[in-house]
């Protein structure tokens, strides 16, 4: 069952229904938070009544953990490999936005075509953030992603979170005799 906004009871989805996190940790859809702001003049959490420092709803963080797509709706496999690095052009029609999260919970939001390969995704990470593809391992739902497969092969859709582990090569260890 998909997570829902506790104010309007609608399922979270991209756009006006995407879940936004308040500083208290509770999340509600953008539409409801805009209505609360317009009605009361402040952003007070409907659950715990904590008032948020920011009064601008557009500055709140999207909670992508709540906005996961149903795996059963993804059943096609389309080979290919087009990607558009963020900032070079607006995302093309059909592009999805995935979040790559490292072990320190730093998030990298990337627009990419669902027909792009995992290798293409690593190239986008390198172009935008300088992360070397040869030192990067990507995981989705506990499975290591293979470079030659596409995002569609793994049913990765907008809002999905891909875990990233990077391998660091250290210096020589001095041994005392």
Image (cartoon, grey):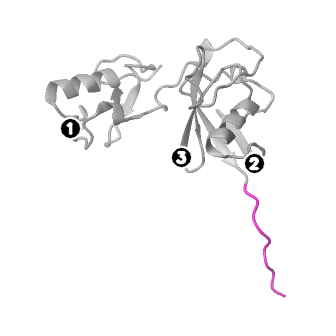
Badge 3 is on which residue? 105
Q: CA distance from mark 1 to mark 2?
A: 45 Å
Badge 1 is on which residue? 49
Sequence-wise first label, 3 or 2: 3
Residue at point 34%, 31% (across, down): 58
Magenta stretch in the rendered image: 168-177
Q: Quadrant of residue 84?
A: top right
Residue mark closest to the camera, 3 vs 2: 2
Q: Give the total number of marks visible in the rendering.
A: 3
Sequence-wise first label, 3 or 1: 1
Residue at point 68%, 46% (across, down): 131
Q: Is residue 106 among what the camera can see?
A: yes
Residue 69: percent from the left, percent from the top?
54, 20
Residue 132: percent from the left, percent from the top?
72, 46
Element under disc 3: loop
Residue at point 72%, 56% (across, down): 168
Sequence-wise first label, 1 or 2: 1
Report the front residue among 98 and 48. 98
Q: Outermost residue, front direction?
A: 88
The reply to whether dot 3 and dot 1 touch (C-beta < 8 Å) is no
Badge 2 is on which residue? 135
Instruction: Tell whether 116 sits left or right of 110.
Output: right
Quadrant that contains the C terminus: bottom right
Report the front residue among 115 and 13. 115
Report the front residue among 81 and 157. 81
Q: CA distance from mark 3 to mark 2?
A: 18 Å
């Amino acid at each position: 069952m998909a997570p829902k906004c506790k104010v309007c009871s609608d399922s979270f989805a991209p756009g006006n229904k995407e879940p936004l996190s308040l500083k208290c940790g509770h999340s509600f859809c953008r539409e409801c938070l805009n209505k609360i702001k317009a009605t009361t003049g402040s952003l007070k959490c409907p659950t715990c009544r904590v008032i948020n420092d920011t009064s601008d709803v557009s500055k709140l963080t999207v909670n992508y953990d709540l906005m996961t797509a149903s795996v059963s709706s993804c059943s096609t496999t389309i080979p290919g490999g087009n990607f558009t690095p963020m900032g070079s052009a607006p995302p093309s029609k059909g592009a999805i936005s995935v979040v790559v999260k490292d072990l320190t919970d730093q998030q990298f939001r990337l627009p990419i075509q669902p027909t792009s390969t995992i290798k293409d995704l690593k190239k986008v990470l390198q172009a935008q953030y300088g992360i070397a593809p040869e030192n990067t391992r990507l995981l989705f739902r506990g499975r290591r992603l293979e470079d030659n497969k596409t995002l569609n092969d793994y049913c990765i859709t907008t809002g999905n979170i891909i875990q990233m582990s990077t391998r660091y090569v250290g210096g020589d260890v001095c041994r005392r005799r």
